[in-house]
Amino acid sequence: MSLSKRLETVAGFVSPGVTLLDVGSDHAYLPIALMKSGRIVAAIAGEVVAGPYQSACQNVQKEGLSQQIQVRLASGLKALSPEDGVDEIVIAGMGGRLIASILDADPDRLQGVQTLILQPNNREYELRAWLEDHDYQVTAEAILEEAGKIYEIVVAQPGQMRLSLPERTFGPFLLQEKSVVFRKKWAKEADKLAALLAKIPPEHVAEREELALKLAMIREVLDES
Ligand code: SAM
């Protein structure tokens, strides 16, 4: 079993020797790969839907890892309790708003957790805003392309940060780096916004202004090198 490039990049942010919670662990691919490579010592694979939960159970059993990986049918952070001693949490492959709502539903269960490794499929802005508002700081980021899709990964730890609007939008580290994939993502977004703007009638002033401001911010980021 080999991980996708996306999950491989997520796995690369997991610290050696930790106990991990993987929220939304449909096939338990990530905890299985991390256990087999010896990177982590134990994991909980949390899944809220019965079918994927059963698939995770079967895979863990098939790999002979039932002692090290506990598969739990639960929503979000309800899969863990303080005695599990979870050090790091992965929430990958979901919308940014859903990830933020999972964190927001049970903030008390985040006590003692050192690192959140989050891979939102969209609405990264909303996720960074949640982290900022809840005393997390972004400590690392990645952006990658796989099978024509672009994914961002946001790693956060407890701490204070104040992000500017561009940092919240583009990601503080991604903005510094401005990789080829980053430029591709935002050039495409700029084209989409420009096409949208062209269709909005002149009398819709506020709507046009909001879109034009966002477009100008993207163009400024892409133009300066
Ligand atoms: N994390 C894997 C990955 O990145 O490849 C699976 C991503 S899959 C698109 C999203 C999974 O999250 C689904 O299996 C879904 O049932 C599960 N999920 C959605 N909301 C959840 C929640 N509140 N708690 C636990 N799992 C959830």
Image: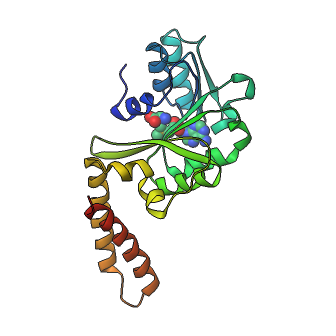
Question: Which quadrant, please, contains the C terminus?
Answer: bottom left
Say whether residue 204 is left or right of residue 159: left
Q: Residue furthest bottom?
A: 203
At x 38%, y 45%, the residue is: 151
| Residue 86 image point, x, y percent | 64, 26
Q: Residue at x 71, y 43 (%)?
A: 106
On the rendered structure, is 67 left or right of 165? Answer: right
Task: State the residue in front, 92 or 39.
Answer: 39
Horizontal side of residue 209 vs 155, given as left or right: left
88, above or below 69, in the image = below
Regarding residue 99, the answer to whether it shows in the image is: yes
Colour option used: rainbow
Q: Position of residue 52 (x, y in %)?
A: 52, 30
- Number of marks drawn: 0
The one of 56 and 164 positioned closer to us in this rendering: 164
Tell me: residue 79, above or below residue 176.
above
Q: Quadrant of residue 17?
A: top right
